Image (cartoon, rainbow, N blue to C red):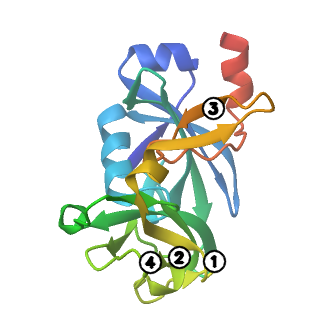
Amino acid sequence: MKVEKRNDKNKVIREQGLVPGVVYGSGIDPVSIQILETDVRQAYNKYGTSMTFTIDLDGDEHIVYIKDYQTDIMNHSHFLHFDLQKVSSGDTITSDVTLAFLNRDKVKVVGHVLTVSMDELEVEYHVGEGVSSIKVDVKDVTVDEPIYVRDIDVPEGITVLADPDAVVVSLATISEAEVETTTTEEGEIDELEAEDEFVEPEAIKQKSPDEDEDDEEE
């Protein structure tokens, strides 16, 4: 993927349909860059925030991965900024990889609902061996047999760092999943609706060399 150095302010870049970004890391000083938003979106959809890929910057190739990104709070498909972390071929990367749940529609237990306790998995891998997501088949989950981290089949070259005994997916009764009931000191009953089954992963909160520029623009 070809990227260009940029000289204009972020606001000007965005008005041109481009996304401002920065590349930094192993053996390179931070470089402010720009790229078409469609190219950023394609790279994110294909590689996620864990797979490495190659960029061309002024004729030099660099191995990078998407370390951080920001999207419009009203439109998550609209990218505002991105960070590319440069790595070397022999480096080891630690990252949270999204879990993709399969066969949810095949889990049908009367009075129960599928609940997800973990939607990302902390893993370690060598450059070039990352994956954008890890599949988890949930069709065999039962009330007595939840799916634990240790039950997940990970691709070759991926080392799981998360607690193997942590629950990933389980079945809960509908009352447990939808309403949590508590009693106050006065004996009143408070009903708190449970959180949504899926929680959208948050972008990594890491300050990049460009954030100071954004602060000035505001």
Q: Nearer the viewer, residue 50 or 213?
A: 50
Answer with left or right where residue 68 lies relative to residue 197: right
The kind of residue on which mark 3 rests is Ile
Q: Is residue 36 above or below residue 194?
A: above
Left or right: where 85 falls relative to 29: left
User: From mark 3 to mark 1, how far is it between C-alphas?
Assistant: 55 Å
Which amino acid type is marked by label 4? Ile
Q: Amino acid at mark 1?
A: Asp
Query: Is there any visible trace of residue 35 in the rendered image?
Result: yes
Looking at the rendered structure, the secondary structure element under dot 1 is loop
Which residue is more in the foreground, 54 or 127? 127
State how far apart marks 1 and 4 are (Cα). 31 Å
The residue tagged 2 is 127
According to the picture, the residue beneath numbered tag 1 turns out to be 91
Q: Amino acid at mark 2?
A: Val
The nearer-to-camera label among 3 and 4 is: 3
> Residues at badges 2 and 1 in contact (C-beta under 8 Å)?
yes
Question: Of marks 3 and 2, which one's residue comes earlier in the chain?
Answer: 2
Q: Position of residue 166 (x, y in %)?
A: 60, 75
The residue to which callout 3 is attached is 189
Looking at the image, which residue is at 69% across and 45% down?
30
Residue 210, position as x, y percentages in the image: 67, 32
Write down the residue under mark 4.
147
Residue 56 location (% of width, % of height) = 43, 54
Q: CA distance from mark 3 to mark 2?
A: 53 Å
Disc 2 from disc 1: Cα separation? 6 Å
* Residue 133, image quadrant: bottom left
Disc 3 element = strand
Quick one: quadrant of the C terminus?
top right
Viewer-proximal residue among 155 and 187: 187
Could you tell which of marks 1 and 4 lies nearer the N-terminus?
1
Earlier in the chain: of badge 2 and badge 1, it is 1
